[in-house]
Amino acid sequence: MPRTERDQSRKLRILVSNDDGINAPGLRVAERIARALTSDVWVVAPEFEQSGASHSLTLHEPLRLRRLSRRRYAVRGTPTDCVIMALDQILKDRKAPDLLISGVNRGTNLGEDVTYSGTVAAAMEGTLLGISSVALSQGYTSPHPVKWHTAEHHAPKLLHRLLKEGWPAGVFINVNFPDVVSAGVKELAVTREGQRDAANIFIDERVDARNVPYYWIGFRRHKGEVHPRSDLAVVARGGISVTPLQIDLTHRRTRQALEQALK
């Protein structure tokens, strides 16, 4: 039986986190998605926005935990900190979550974005701690409003299907919803992690009022030619992308070649 397949008579316990912060509208969307599956929902999210935090830990200052309501907490730390605090402190004497939902992120996490994303990192940490974990992200185009209803409409049924099918230990699921209204979704596709054909990070240098330079990291989106079954391509054509990612980053073919070369 797959690790994540559940006895339907047993109530799911879902942990919800994110990287956009405890007050983010996408977190409220994720809570409603979770409550479409169960009433046993716990929320542990960063006190402040942690976009781009990746899989970082807070090591040089203490973590502060603030209880907002019976099952809702804010942590002054990263998404990874939040998941660890949830398991080690908040739920330490209770049944562990059956599912971790991270998101819903404002903006997609596609291709190389997954290496920077705090949303993806929370799902990664959940996986490391033995929880079936899914990252959810909603595409949008600035300055237009985020179409949160697309994720909210499609995610509950998708999560139910994923849990029924199950996936192996050491694997987590990265789901991206396109920037279209819910009725306009073209397809649901299981995809591979894509790769853009050019670097998309740049440094914006500025000068403050005291003539001292300072810098902003910015992003340029270069789509280029991408694999048609990649997450980038599917979302670009209005589909929902479901990408299984793994904790093990070993490149097996190179490992085997190096074993022979370095004997």
Image: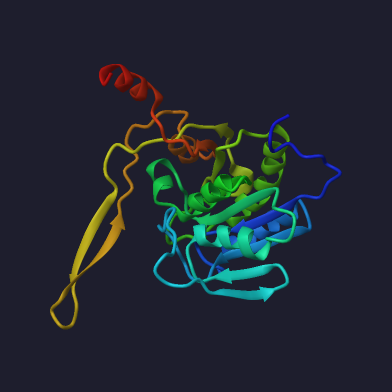
Q: Residue furthest right?
A: 9
In the rendered view, tell whether residue 111 sits above or below residue 70: above
Relative placement, left or right, of 58 versus 98 is: left
Nearest the camera: 168 or 157? 168
Quadrant containing the N terminus in the rendered view: top right
Q: Residue furthest front?
A: 263
Q: Image quadrant of residue 242?
A: top right
Q: Quick check: can you spot residue 139?
A: no
Quadrant containing the C terminus in the rendered view: top left
- Please tell me which residue is depicted at 56% across the width and 32% down the height of the picture: 189
Q: Image quadrant of residue 228?
A: top left
In the rendered view, tell whether residue 205 sits above or below residue 176: below
Q: Position of residue 183 (x, y in %)?
A: 64, 45
Q: Residue furthest bottom?
A: 210
Q: Position of residue 257 (x, y in %)?
A: 32, 19
Counting every numbered tag in the picture gives 0
In the rendered view, tell whether residue 96 sits above or below residue 188: below
- Please tell me which residue is depicted at 79% across the width and 58% down the height of the picture: 39
Relative placement, left or right, of 1 versus 110 is: right
Q: Position of residue 17 (x, y in %)?
A: 58, 59
Q: Quick check: can you spot residue 113?
A: yes
Nearest the camera: 237 or 167? 167
Q: Image quadrant of residue 217?
A: bottom left
- Please tell me which residue is depicted at 65% across the width and 47% down the height of the picture: 155
Q: Residue furthest left?
A: 211
Coloration mode? rainbow
Q: Position of residue 219 (x, y in %)?
A: 31, 54
Relative placement, left or right, of 79 versus 259 is: right
